[in-house]
Image (cartoon, rainbow, N blue to C red):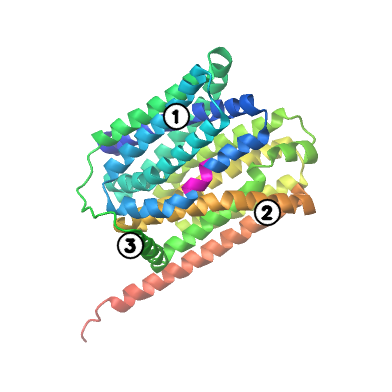
Amino acid sequence: MIKLLKNRNALIFVLSRVLSRFGDSLESLALMYLVYDLTGSAVAMGTVMLFSMIPNFLISPIAGVIADRYSKKRIMFIAEMVRAGAIILIPVLMFSGTIQLWHIYSMAVLVSVAESFFEPCANIVFVSIVDKEELHLVNSVSTVLGRIAGILGYSLAGLLIVFVNKEVLFIFDSITFLLSGVAVLVIKLPKSQEKKIGKALEIISDFKEGVKYIFTTKLIPILFLGILILSALLVPLERFVPVAVDQIFSLSPTWAGIFMTTLTIGSIVGGILYPILVKKNIKLKNAYLYNLVLLGVVILISCYIKSQYILFIMFFSVGAISSIIGSWSFTEIQKSCDERYLGRVGSVATMVMLAAAPLASFLSGVLIEAFSLINVWKLAGLLFIVVGLFMYIKISKLHEIKSEIIEFSEPVADN
């Protein structure tokens, strides 16, 4: 922690991201209420999310290539200015009384496009300004502070919407993007060789090269697979809480909010525990095994002992363990990845994460309709145990192969 405080560049970058996260949480709640006020439609609210996701998914491959080739600071600064400009248009249109739904869709697309370019660059910058042995700690601090900022932002947004107005929330979010852009300019980065952006075929070729690199590393595709499966299995636990509260446990709707808050608190605790576990020299394969088997057991217990107190433990465990495994996996990817490919690897990670949630939501919905939510939870619990064992075996085998290569490459002493 002391090293982080002494690292001016990392400190500025982390604090700017946390402030931006706080602004996003204010704006996202205001946006939901704005769309609902304009349309009264839950479908319209969901469509805004769709407009936010699709550009990100489509543009990420191109953005990853450009991030690896071009000035990271310039891309990030432009992206933040675009996001600030897109967000500030909303209160301007609200004050003038001309705001329409298509304006919000357009804003969502612009913000998503800018985010697609900002995030892979941010990943590269993060790795370049933080020592690799400190990545786990800085990732943990950034994650924990970001989640705390999110909680505070959502809480404050509810009060401001009641006592002030929604326009103020959009203005504040726009200011956070401006400040983030200034922070980008202040940060000093190591000099890197820039290339021309190139033609479309060259960009496609670069992206293919990045995908090929991922599979040559052996460890990164295994971690991608672990993250993908983990994200998919979390969906029926996190996104269908109101159904569980009503149909399975016969509790009041208030409990849904309590359980989601418990999950968030668990994720904060997990973010704090992660660097402690790393310092204890626990191996990644053991982290997968112990955490996912424990989570699977807790989920199965909650399915058979239908008590709100057991549910507290389950949701806390879901938050904590998903935070530990997620942070650990992404940090290992950052540490093991060649910096020349970080942008492209980050863009593939974004595509994996974006694809996992909607597909898993659809599949979960189909399975719940066919077999009931409690049975889907039971299946998720069993699969967490299986995935924990699978990841332990795969990572162990990978380490064995590496050890054999090192042994084979060592010179044999003459007799």
Q: What's the magenta region?
A: 52-56
Q: Amino acid at mark 3?
A: Glu
The residue lying at 35 percent from left, 33 percent from top is 81
- Judged from the image, the secondary structure of the residue bearing numbered disc 3 is helix
The residue lying at 61 percent from left, 53 percent from top is 359
Local packing at callout 1 (Cα closer than 10 Å; few below 14, some 14-19, many 20+) is many
- Can you tell which mark lies on residue 87? 1
- Judged from the image, the secondary structure of the residue bearing numbered disc 1 is helix
Judge from the rendering whether residue 104 lies leftward or rightward of residue 382; answer left or right.
Answer: left
User: Dots 3 and 2: beta carbons under 8 Å?
Assistant: no
**Alpha-carbon distance for marks 2 and 1?**
33 Å
| 51 within the magenta span | no
The residue lying at 29 percent from left, 31 percent from top is 182
- Judged from the image, the secondary structure of the residue bearing numbered disc 2 is helix
Residue tagged 2:
363
Judge from the rendering whether residue 159 lies leftward or rightward of residue 71; answer left or right.
Answer: right
The residue sitting at the front extreme is 98
- Is 149 or 213 nearer to us in this picture? 213
Position in image of residue 127 (x %, y %): 32, 48
Q: Amino acid at mark 1?
A: Ile
Q: Is residue 371 visible?
A: no
Residue tagged 3:
202
Q: Earlier in the sequence, mark 3 or mark 1?
A: 1
Q: Earlier in the sequence, mark 3 or mark 2?
A: 3
Position in image of residue 411 (x %, y %): 24, 79
Q: Quadrant of residue 209?
A: bottom left
